[in-house]
Image (spheres, rainbow, N blue to C red):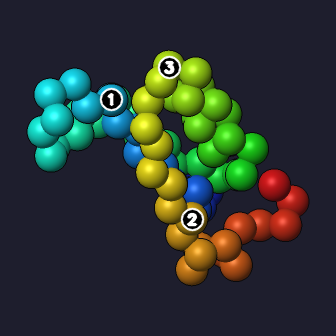
Amino acid sequence: MSVPRPFRAVAYAPHVDGGRQREVVGRAAAKSAAGLQRFLDAHAEAGHAVDTLEVLDLLDEIPADL
């Protein structure tokens, strides 16, 4: 059985040429807010911009013992 991973994020490299398309440098699908925070911290340290999304419909499916 797979574990729901409701915390999502995508990290992007900084714009260097002013173009509209951003280069993706990382994606996260974490099962906990702490896991997502580790991803955010690592990419913030590297100077990347990060868009986050919390998939709320999956939150009620997370087992209480995680």
Dot 1 and dot 3 residues touching (CB under 8 Å): no
- Image x and y of residue 33, in percent: 71, 52
Say which amino acid is labelled 1. Ala
- The residue that mark 3 highlights is 46
For image coordinates 43% across by 38% down, the residue present is 49
Instruction: Give percent across and percent down for residue 3.
Output: 61, 56
Name the residue nearer the viewer: 52 or 33: 52
Q: CA distance from mark 1 to mark 3?
A: 9 Å
Q: Choose the circle earlier in sequence order: 3 or 2.
A: 3
Q: Is residue 44 above or below residue 29?
A: above
Density class for disc 1 (Cα within 10 Å; few <14, some 14-19, many ≥20) is some
Query: What residue is pinned by disc 1?
Result: 13
Left or right: 43 in relation to 17: right
Q: Look at the picture and state if 38 lies above or below 4.
A: above
- SS at mark 3 in the image: loop
Task: Name above or below for residue 63 compared with residue 42.
Answer: below
| First along the sequence among labels 1 and 2 | 1
Q: Which mark is residue 29?
A: none
Nearer to us of marks 1 and 2 is 1
Instruction: Give above or below for 36 relative to 5.
Output: above
Residue 11 at x, y = what percent?
41, 38
Label 3 neighbour load within 10 Å: few <14, some 14-19, many 20+:
few
What residue is at 59 percent from the left and 48 percent from the top? 30
**Where residue 24 sits in the image (x, y, percent)?**
29, 36
Q: Quadrant of the C terminus?
A: bottom right
Structural distance between the alpha carbons of marks 1 and 2: 21 Å
Q: Which mark is residue 54?
A: 2
